[in-house]
Amino acid sequence: MFRRRKWMIYATVGPEFILGAAAGQYESVHKAVQEFKRTGHPEWTMPHAFFADMGGFMLHASDCKPFPVNNKHIQWLAANAFITFPEVSSLDIWDKSKADRLVKTIGWLAVTKLELSTVSIVFCTVMTYFCWLHKPSDVKTPIHLFTQHKMADILIAGGDAAKRPYHMTPLDFIDNLGPTWSGNVMAFAGIRCGPQERPLPRLPNDRFPHVRSIRQYLLIIMTLFSDGIHIFGWHFAFPSHSELIIWRVASLVMFCTAAVFWFAELFAGLYRDGVLEMFKNIIVNPSRVSEANAARKERPPRPQPTPETFPLPWEFAASMTVFLLYLVARAYVLAEMFAGLRELPHSAYQNVDWSNFFPHVS
C-alpha cells in the first residue's frame, strides 16, 4: 500500500518521473526479450519479461533465503544449468494480474478538463500506459524456481565478480538491481528507506531508467513537451498580475530544469560509453579515427554502479538543485490550477455549440 501511495504522489507531483520510469522498464524488458530470443527462447514474451523484472520469480536454494530474480538472473542461471528454464505461458502471467488490458488501455479516459496542467498529466499518462501495456498489474503471488545446487556453487561459477560482498542479492555479480533512488541517492543522503533485509525480499521499483536507443530521444521530446505545455499559458488570464508572472517563471523553470537534466544525462552517457574519449583522441590525432573507434568497442564494459560509486558528490548536489527547483515550480503550478478558479473570464463559462463545428443537413 505504501508503494502505491508513493507512486501516486510521484504521478501528481511529476508525471514525467513516472513516464521516465515506464520508458526505462520498457527498454529493459525489450532488451531482455531480444536476448532470450537470441539464446533460443522465443517463448519469453514481453509479459514474461515484465513479470520477471517485477520480482515475479522467486529463487530457492538450500543454503540461502529465497529471494526474487529478474530477467538477467534467470538467463544466466538457465544458461549455466543451475535452474530449468521456466515454462510459464503468457496466460499464466496474466492470470496473476489484477487488471486486464482493456482497463489498462482506457483507464486514462476518466481524466477530463482541457486545462494545460491536465493536458500535461494526461499526455504523460497515455505514454506511460503505452509502455506498460504488456505489464501485469498488482501481482501478489510469485512463481517459485528451485535449484538443486547450493548458492555457494553458483557463486563459485560466477568467478571473481561473485567474490565481492553483495548489496542486494547474492546474484549482484549478474545484475545488482541498481542504481535506485532508495538504494543509492537516499542512502548517500544518510536516509534509510526501503527494505533493509538482505537478500532483498522484493525487487526495487525505483530503479533509474537506462535508455540508450532512439527511445531515449523520444523520451526527451515527450518530457520536454509535457513540461513545455505550461508555457502556452503565457498570455492566459490570471486573477492577478503577480500570479501571471510567477506562472511564467515556474513554466520556464520546469522546462529548463528538464532540459538541463537531459543534457547532463546525455553528457554522462557519452562519457560512460567512451564516446567523449574517442572524440578527444580524434581531435588530437584525426588520422587515427578507425583506431580510436576500435579501441572504444574493445574496451571492457564499465562495472555496474554501487552505493560507493553512485552518485558522486557533485552529481548528487547538481541533481538535488535541479530537483528542488523543479519541485518548487511544480508546486506553484499545481496550486495555481485550483487558485485560478476563483476568477475566470466569462468565456470559460460558455457552452460549446458543437453544431457550429460539424457539417449538418437541414
Image (cartoon, grey):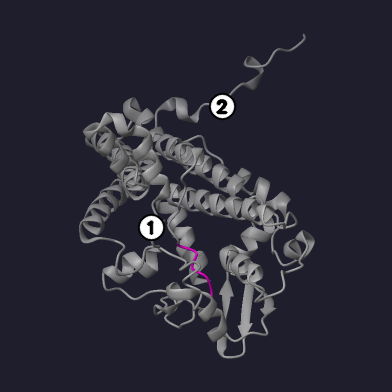
Position of residue 264 relative to residue 193, above or below, is above
Q: Amino acid at mark 1?
A: Arg
- Of 62 and 12, the residue lying toward us: 62
- Residue at x 72% of width, y 49% of height: 102
Decide which of tag 2 and tag 1 comes sooner along the chain: 1
SS under mark 2 = loop
Q: Quadrant of residue 240?
A: top left
Q: How many marks on residues?
A: 2
From this viewpoint, is residue 259 visible?
Answer: yes
- The residue under label 1 is 302
Q: Is residue 244 visible?
A: no
Q: Which amino acid type is shown beneath numbered disc 2?
A: Asn
Q: Decide: few, some or many residues near mark 1? Use Cα within 10 Å; few <14, some 14-19, many ≥20.
A: few
Q: Nearer the viewer, residue 199 or 334?
A: 199
Residues in magenta? 201-206
* Chief SS of the magenta region: loop
Assign a secondary structure to mark 1: loop
Numbered label attached to residue 351: 2
Q: Residues within 10 Å of mark 2 (few under 14, many from 20)?
A: few
Position of residue 110 measured from the top left corner of the image (x, y, whole percent): 61, 46
On screen, residue 92 versus residue 106, left or right, reads right
